[in-house]
Image: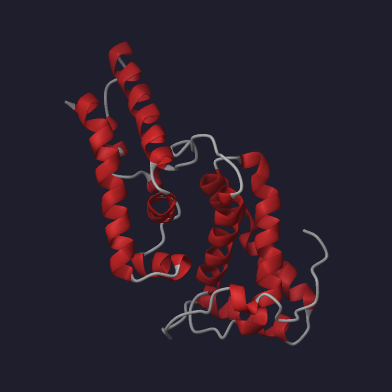
Amino acid sequence: MPNFPPVDGSEEAHEPRDGDERPMSGVEQSDLELVRRVQRGERAAFDLLVLRYQHKVVKLVARLLRDPAEAEDVAQEAFVKAYRAIGSFRGDSAFYTWLYRIAVNTARNAMASRQRRPLDYESDLSESEQSTVESRMRHSDTPEAVALSDEIHRTVNRAVGDLPEDLRTAVILREVEGLSYEEIAQAMDCPVGTVRSRIFRAREAIDRSLKPLLE
């Protein structure tokens, strides 16, 4: 990662504030300790946070941008923004949720500036991350079944790529990143009810695209 500029609060007006207080896990407590060290001027502590989260942030940004080649630069920009805004972080919510919101906003800015190609929604999913859509694709290894499975994957990719940006972001954060509805609400700066509506509408759109194949 690059040399980060000093924490001067210049980004605070544009970056998120964390949400309501709740009990912290061991990881969150460890994150908070590192954040406090950064806020006291210990720059090396931020490097530890970068090492902890850079892989997840790069993967998230790559999915949102649908351009893995650009993900590194946009993720780097997100970390720079986080460093500059870290003085505003109070520790009332998980650091990674706060960081994800910065990453989502940075990716949105990048998406708004140019046209993107379709997202490969399925390519990075592990078995534990499979959505309910994937559960429908348990076929035998016959040529016909393989062809149908490939077509379903392509259809899902197109359907997700065609979603409005807010629906696509919500369903990726839920199905791929595994965030809770509350965490997605914080990351997207909207009510939990809005998150539920967006994910419901995204899944409906994907199901409509799949219906002719599944029938």
Q: Quadrant of residue 182?
A: bottom left
Closest to the observer, 115 or 161: 115
Q: Residue at 74% of width from left, 68% of height from top?
A: 47
Q: Quadrant of residue 139?
A: top left
- Residue 101, how many percent across, how many down? 52, 66
In the displayed image of the protein, which residue is found farthest to the front?
113
In the displayed image of the protein, which residue is found farthest to the left?
215
Q: Is residue 164 above or below residue 209?
A: below
- Residue 172, how many percent across, how many down? 42, 50
- Residue 91, how many percent across, how many down? 54, 83
Q: Is residue 111 above or below residue 181?
A: above
* 188 on left or right of 35: left
Q: Is residue 17 above or below residue 112?
A: below
In the displayed image of the protein, which residue is found farthest to the right?
3
Q: How is the image coloured?
A: secondary structure
Image quadrant where one finds the N terminus:
bottom right
Image quadrant where one finds the C terminus:
top left
- Residue 166, how many percent across, how many down? 41, 55
Closest to the observer, 101 or 180: 101
Closest to the observer, 138 or 177: 177
Q: Residue at 43% of width from left, 55% of height from top?
A: 173
Q: Is residue 91 above or below residue 152?
A: below
* 161 on left or right of 212: right
Q: Residue at 59% of width from left, 56% of height from top?
A: 109
